Amino acid sequence: MRFRCPRGAAEVLSAGVVALAVLVLAVRTAAGAVQALEDAWPLLLALALLAAAVTAWRLARAIQARRGDAERLATLRITLSEFDAMDDRQFEYALRDLLVRDGWPARRVGGGGDQAADVIGDHTQRGRIVVQAKHTRVGGKVGSSVMYAVKGTAGPAHRADHAVVVTNGTFTRDAMAWGDRHSVLWVDRDNLRCWAENGTALHELLGLSVRRSRFKRAA
């Protein structure tokens, strides 16, 4: 589309009127926007303050979490090579100590007739955890039969809210899948590093936030 210059006084006057109307509309629109901002500024300020508060809270939580990890590591840190050098009994005591480090009063109960529990910890908020320790040679794998045993005794024999199998090795694919389906938690070599070397608390690693029994208990 091509535009031509207005010709004659009438067209010039019409063009001027249109331009003035456009200018008036633009001014009114700008004034309305300014007025809307003036009316809404308390809400915008409140939203900005809320966003700043949420950001500060998240930052404080992150700092607190890092400080907690550092304190736990200062209390106890066990490397994978140290786990590999342990025997079964030492491994069980090490897991007990890690639970205590994380705020779970725990005791070693492993031995003859332990009914698939080597360590038991009781937490005021998160309930009772039963740990089955499976120390293996490097490269060893834990099979599904261990999961079956833990599932069968965690509730009836030990009145557990949570049960976990911990190994310095790995699990077979079937064992992990079965455990996931039947609420038997598992900690393999990689997770053990996060727990023992990096200082992540076990309940954070496994998501054990509140008391919630996963098993049927004995009457």
Image (cartoon, rainbow, N blue to C red):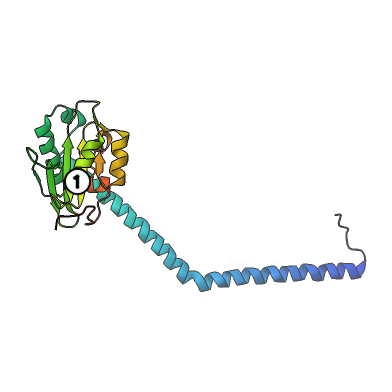
Where residue 54 appears, as percent x and y from the top left, is: 36, 59
Closest to the observer: 26 or 155? 155
Where residue 75 appears, as percent x and y from the top left, is: 14, 42
Tell me the crowding category of disc 1: few under 14, some 14 to 19, or many 20 or more residues within 10 angstroms, Cα based.
some
Q: Amino acid at mark 1?
A: Gly
Q: Quadrant of residue 209?
A: bottom left
Residue drawn at (86%, 70%) of the image: 13
- Considering every residue shown, the one lying at the far right of the view is 8
Residue drawn at (20%, 31%) of the image: 80
Q: Quadrant of residue 25?
A: bottom right
Closest to the observer: 79 or 32? 79
Q: What residue would you read off at disc 1? A: 152
Closest to the observer: 85 or 173? 173
Where residue 185 appears, as percent x and y from the top left, is: 25, 44
Residue drawn at (18%, 44%) of the image: 72
Where residue 83 appears, as percent x and y from the top left, is: 17, 31
Classify mark 1: helix, strand or loop: helix
Closest to the observer: 213 or 174? 174
Quadrant in which the N terminus is drawn:
bottom right
Q: Quadrant of residue 76?
A: top left
Residue drawn at (56%, 71%) of the image: 36
Please give the count of numbered marks on the rendered protein: 1
Q: Is residue 102 visible?
A: no
Quadrant in which the C terminus is drawn:
bottom left
Q: Is residue 37 visible?
A: yes
Position of residue 135 in the picture relative to residue 186 (left or right):
left
Examine the rendered structure and indicate whether residue 182 appears above or below residue 89. Answer: below
